[in-house]
Amino acid sequence: MPVANPSVHQYQSCIDACNDCLVACEDCLTLCLQESDVQARVTCINLLRDCNDICSLAARYMSRGSTYAKQLCNLCATICDACALECAKFQDPHCQQCAEACRKCAEECHKMAS
């Protein structure tokens, strides 16, 4: 029986934060597209898409123990920080929850990349 990649355990809290963040971003994106002020949210929507994609990719890189996981997590933290700032501008509960998930993910990715 194959043994799980041992590096995954050391990254598990970061993988979990990335997965939580991508779910929050996807939910926020879906709901932002239904808001009456959708045009005011274009920058946010684009950041949500970027954040969703980078979180998914970072989780996959960490899960397989890629030698590039730290570099990717560094970029992930940068994008999550930007997404958190943009989402925090909107008072909707889904935006505030997403901003919090992004901040947590950025914190975990900063720790992992250092």
Image: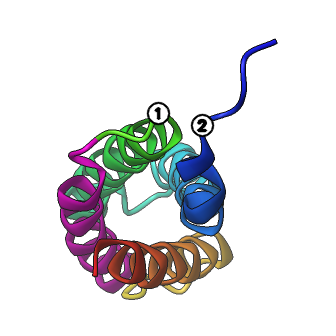
- The disc at residue 64 is 1
Give yes or no for residue 84 being in the magenta stretch. Answer: yes
Determine which residue is flagged by label 2: 5
Q: Mark 2 to mark 1: distance in Å?
A: 7 Å
Dots 2, 1 in contact, CB < 8 A = yes
Q: Quarter of the image holding residue 4?
A: top right
Residue type highlighted by circle 2: Asn
Q: Residues within 10 Å of mark 1 (few under 14, many from 20)?
A: some
Quadrant showing the C terminus: bottom left
- Residue most extreme to the right: 1
Q: Earlier in the sequence, mark 2 or mark 1?
A: 2
Q: Is residue 81 above or below residue 4?
A: below
Which residue is found at the position 21% from the left and 46% from the top?
68
Side of 71 where 50 appears, left or right: right
What secondary structure do most residues of the magenta stretch adopt?
helix
Task: Please give the range of residues in magenta.
Answer: 67-87
- The disc at residue 46 is none
User: Is 59 or 43 nearer to us in this picture?
Assistant: 59
Residue type highlighted by circle 1: Arg
